[in-house]
């Protein structure tokens, strides 16, 4: 099973690398969708082992309902993210929000959540006491880091969504990031309150949870998601004034989280080098 998960992660890596090249409007339009699908599959395969299908479905439903509500609300009234509309992002829409966005939200939310458990040395321990609130808080920062690195490229250059009047952060309004923190925290805190009362796992799951390779999967997914920003300055000719700074921001945010998570897993005494 771990081999299947790593194959999907490698597919996500290949899609991410290809996406960093300008291969024409038709391919450029479909690559974000392929990226989200491959990341979603990897997150689901990992999450099914970590939390079980039912609890993972609850996580997905919470993420869908909260994120879709606030996306649609912001498109209509500008709260909480600011005024914008979706333009080139492919796929069906509900209340003007592309459905593919919900799968991206969930995938990165799951990966960010897992990395927060790594950073706080939680791993597979049941959520108790202050961890019920600390895990969501740290996970929120980890996920907003992704948007900090991704949004200027996807909106200002990719025109997947367009901000009305632009913004001071490479065309993105600062309100967007405070809005992201607000919305993502609601998602994580809601799941934390749920999973603290409903998390159960078997001896068979425990055998997987003590393997370092299992937790490295989440690290790989988060790091690969940041790879696009790192490659873009070298694989594109135009817009160096945005690609360069976004690569720099990615190094000191997403790549730092990737590095510290990798080191913590590698040095953990709770886990074993079993594959």
Image (spheres, grey):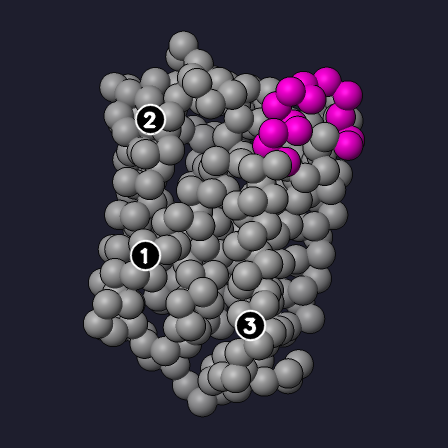
Residue picked out by circle 3:
265
Q: Residue at x 47, y 37 (%)?
A: 147
Q: Where 264 sits versus 233, above or below?
A: below
Mark 2 or mark 3: which comes first in sequence? 2
Q: Residue at x 45, y 55 (%)?
A: 112
Mark 2 or mark 1: which comes first in sequence? 1
Q: Where 118 sits versus 69, above or below?
A: below
Badge 1, how many Cα within 10 Å: few under 14, some, many 20+?
A: many
Marks 3 and 1 in Cβ contact (< 8 Å): no
Q: Is residue 39 visible?
A: no
Residue 229 percent location from the top left of the image:
64, 37
Q: Is residue 272 magenta?
A: no
Q: Residue at x 44, y 47 (%)?
A: 143
Q: Return the residue nearer the eye: 53 or 264.
A: 264
* Residue 224 left/right relative to 73: right
Q: Secondary structure at mark 3?
A: helix
* Residue 139 left/right relative to 217: left
Q: Nearer the viewer, mark 3 or mark 1?
A: 3
Mark 3 or mark 1: which comes first in sequence? 1
Residue picked out by circle 1:
136
Magenta segment range? Answer: 234-247
Total marks drawn?
Answer: 3
Residue reaching furthest to the top? 165
Q: Is residue 262 visible?
A: yes
Q: Which mark is residue 175?
A: 2
């Amino acid at each position: 099973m771990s081999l299947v998960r790593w194959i999907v992660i490698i597919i996500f890596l290949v899609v991410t690398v290809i996406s960093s090249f300008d291969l024409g409007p038709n391919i450029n339009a479909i690559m974000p969708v392929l990226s989200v699908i491959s990341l979603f599959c990897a997150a689901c395969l990992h999450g099914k082992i970590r939390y079980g299908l039912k609890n993972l479905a609850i996580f997905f439903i919470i993420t869908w309902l909260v994120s879709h509500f606030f996306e649609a609300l912001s498109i209509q009234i500008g709260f909480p993210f600011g005024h914008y509309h979706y333009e080139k992002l492919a796929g069906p829409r509900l209340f003007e929000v592309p459905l593919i966005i919900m799968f991206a939200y969930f995938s990165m939310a799951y990966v960010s959540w897992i990395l927060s458990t790594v950073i706080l040395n939680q791993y597979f321990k049941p959520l108790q006491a202050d961890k019920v609130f600390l895990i969501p808080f740290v996970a929120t920062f980890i996920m907003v880091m992704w948007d900090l690195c991704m949004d200027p490229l996807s909106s200002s250059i990719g025109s997947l969504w367009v901000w009305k009047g632009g913004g001071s952060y490479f065309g993105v309004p600062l309100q967007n990031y405070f809005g992201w923190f607000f919305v993502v925290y609601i998602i994580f805190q809601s799941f934390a309150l749920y999973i603290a009362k409903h998390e159960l796992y078997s001896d068979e799951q425990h055998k997987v949870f003590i393997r370092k390779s299992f937790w490295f999967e989440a690290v790989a997914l988060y790091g690969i998601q940041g790879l696009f920003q790192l490659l873009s300055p070298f694989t594109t000719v135009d817009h160096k004034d945005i690609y360069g700074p976004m690569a720099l921001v990615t190094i000191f945010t997403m790549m730092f989280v990737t590095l510290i998570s990798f080191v913590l897993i590698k040095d953990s005494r709770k886990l074993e080098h079993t594959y």
